[in-house]
């Protein structure tokens, strides 16, 4: 147990740390804390030395302890947020920034850290909106003005992309279907109200050319609430003649996000699909559970997917894996003595793998994905056919 003057020992430990002897300094700081565990300046400095050494987990623990004892320590909030940025835990940094701003309302340093965390999380328009607000509040702050200009110079507001994918049905002899080929050409524009994406989709299936035009909007409504709005049109046989979609996304405490919406499709008949999701950001990982419910005859179809993403440097560099399942009621027409009331669920499963990455200057982005599907045959209950899909995408920003 430490038995001495904590202030003098603290000063000596600081001298050791600033003279390249951090391991010795940390030993001294930890020893002082055995007697004075709530000497917050010492614990804060210990956290900082951990962060300097790249020991972000230990720094996170100590900063958390300090701020749980006294949340009115702005310098420690800033150091804690920067620790998460250095650790590339950008969603953690963003959540901490929001918490700190509840205590230090409209603080320029914290607003800049919030914008940086949004930028690193791929929320480019949110970052710019944060800095627009910061400039309104701190119009004479040169650092705020300079940081806003740097974000504007870094952001690319336009993106042109193209993607190709193929469904391979003929790798299994029992499948009579021909391969299907998909191409999408897209243009997106980031605006202060949200993003706009225009797409031209091409599908070649059963030696038939199919085209569809669609527009997707992601308008921001208020802080933590945005929407997905979509519309599409086609006069091709294998696309819906009209399709519309709407979904609301809401940020929740503890880095959760929930959504609820629908998709409406018009073929020869009309179909409405209800959908919702629950997502969770934890460090540089993202988990999401999404479900679909489709009422209809002879019963309601249900499907769902569990999605996992592991982000690297930012939201455009990640690995993803998705596992899905579904059940669609259908009439068992081939059962002996069929009366029109016999129903069974057609089962389906899928696995999707994807890898997405960008160039160092963030102007070019590539993506690769591979999928495997297993679907029950409607004319042979309990038997399945399999098919696979491969895709590639490229986008350029300017």
Image (tube, rainbow, N blue to C red):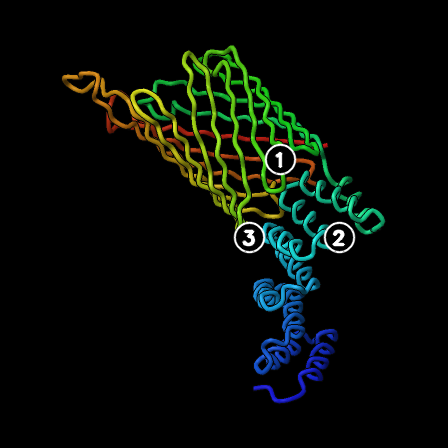
Residue 281, image x and y in percent?
53, 48
Q: Secondary structure at mark 3?
A: loop
Q: Is residue 334 visible?
A: yes
Residue at x 59%, y 23% (from the top left corner): 215
Q: Residue at x 69, y 43 (%)?
A: 127
Residue 102 figure quarter: bottom right
Q: Residue furthest bottom?
A: 3
Quarter of the view holding residue 300: top left
Q: Which residue in the structure is indicated by mark 2?
A: 108
Of pointers 3 and 2, the one earlier in the residue sequence: 2
| In this view, 173 is above or below 47 | above
Q: Is 138 on the left-hand or right-hand side of 22?
A: right
Callout 2 environment at 10 Å: few (<14), some (14 to 19), or many (20+)? many
| Residue 220 rendering spot, x and y as whole percentages | 63, 35
Q: Earlier in the sequence, mark 1 or mark 3?
A: 1
Instruction: State the residue in front, 13 or 63.
Output: 63
Of labels 2 and 1, earlier in sequence is 2
Q: Which residue is mark 3?
A: 283
Tag 1 residue: 221
Question: Disc 1 vs disc 3: Cβ atoms closer than 8 Å?
Answer: no
Q: Position of residue 371 (x, y in %)?
A: 44, 33
Q: In this rendering, which labeled residue sits more in front, label 3 or label 2?
A: 2
Specify the quadrant that holds the N terminus: bottom right
Q: Nearer the viewer, residue 93 or 391?
A: 93
Task: Name the residue: 59% across, 26% down.
Answer: 216
Q: Is residue 101 above or below residue 245?
A: below
The C terminus lies in quadrant: top right
Judge from the rendering whether residue 218 lies leftward or rightward of residue 9; answer left or right: left
Query: Gap between marks 3 and 2, in whole Å?
Result: 25 Å
- How crowded pointer 3 is (Cα within 10 Å; few <14, some 14-19, many 20+) is rated as some
For mark 1, give the secondary structure.
Answer: strand
Give above or below for 133 relative to 61.
above
């Amino acid at each position: 147990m430490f038995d001495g003057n904590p202030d003098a020992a603290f000063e000596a430990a600081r001298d050791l740390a600033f003279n390249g002897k951090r391991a010795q300094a940390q030993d001294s700081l930890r020893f002082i804390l055995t007697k004075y565990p709530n000497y917050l300046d010492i614990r804060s400095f210990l956290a900082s030395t951990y962060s300097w050494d790249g020991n972000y987990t230990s720094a996170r623990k100590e900063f958390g302890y300090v701020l749980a004892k006294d949340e009115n320590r702005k310098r420690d909030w800033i150091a804690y947020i920067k620790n998460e940025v250095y650790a590339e835990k950008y969603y953690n940094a963003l959540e901490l920034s929001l918490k700190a701003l509840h205590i230090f309302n409209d603080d320029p340093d914290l607003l800049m850290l919030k914008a940086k965390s949004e930028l690193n999380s791929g929320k480019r328009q949110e970052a710019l909106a944060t800095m627009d607000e910061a400039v309104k509040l701190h119009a004479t702050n040169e650092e705020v003005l300079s940081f806003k200009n740097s974000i504007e110079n870094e952001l690319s507001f336009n993106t042109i992309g193209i993607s190709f994918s193929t469904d391979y049905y003929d790798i299994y002899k029992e499948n009579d279907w021909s391969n299907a080929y998909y191409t999408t050409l897209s243009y997106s524009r980031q605006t202060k109200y949200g993003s706009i994406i225009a797409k031209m989709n091409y599908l070649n299936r059963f030696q038939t050319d199919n085209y569809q035009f669609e527009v997707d909007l992601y308008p921001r409504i208020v802080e933590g609430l945005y929407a997905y709005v979509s519309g599409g049109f086609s006069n091709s046989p294998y696309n819906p003649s009209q399709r519309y979609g709407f979904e609301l996304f809401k940020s929740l405490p503890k880095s959760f996000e929930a959504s609820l919406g629908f998709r409406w499709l018009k073929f020869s008949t009309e179909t409405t699909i209800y959908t919702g999701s629950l997502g969770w950001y934890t460090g540089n990982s993202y988990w999401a559970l999404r479900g679909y419910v489709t009422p209809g005859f002879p019963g309601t179809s249900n499907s769902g997917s569990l999605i996992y993403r592991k982000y690297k440097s930012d939201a455009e560099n990640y690995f993803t894996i998705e596992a899905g399942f579904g059940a669609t009621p259908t009439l068992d027409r081939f059962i002996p003595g069929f009366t029109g009331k016999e129903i069974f669920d057609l089962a389906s499963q899928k696995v999707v793998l994807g890898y997405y990455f960008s160039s160092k200057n963030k102007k070019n982005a590539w993506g690769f994905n591979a999928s495997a599907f297993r679907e029950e045959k409607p004319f042979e209950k309990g038997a399945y056919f399999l098919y696979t899909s491969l895709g590639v995408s490229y986008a350029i920003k300017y």
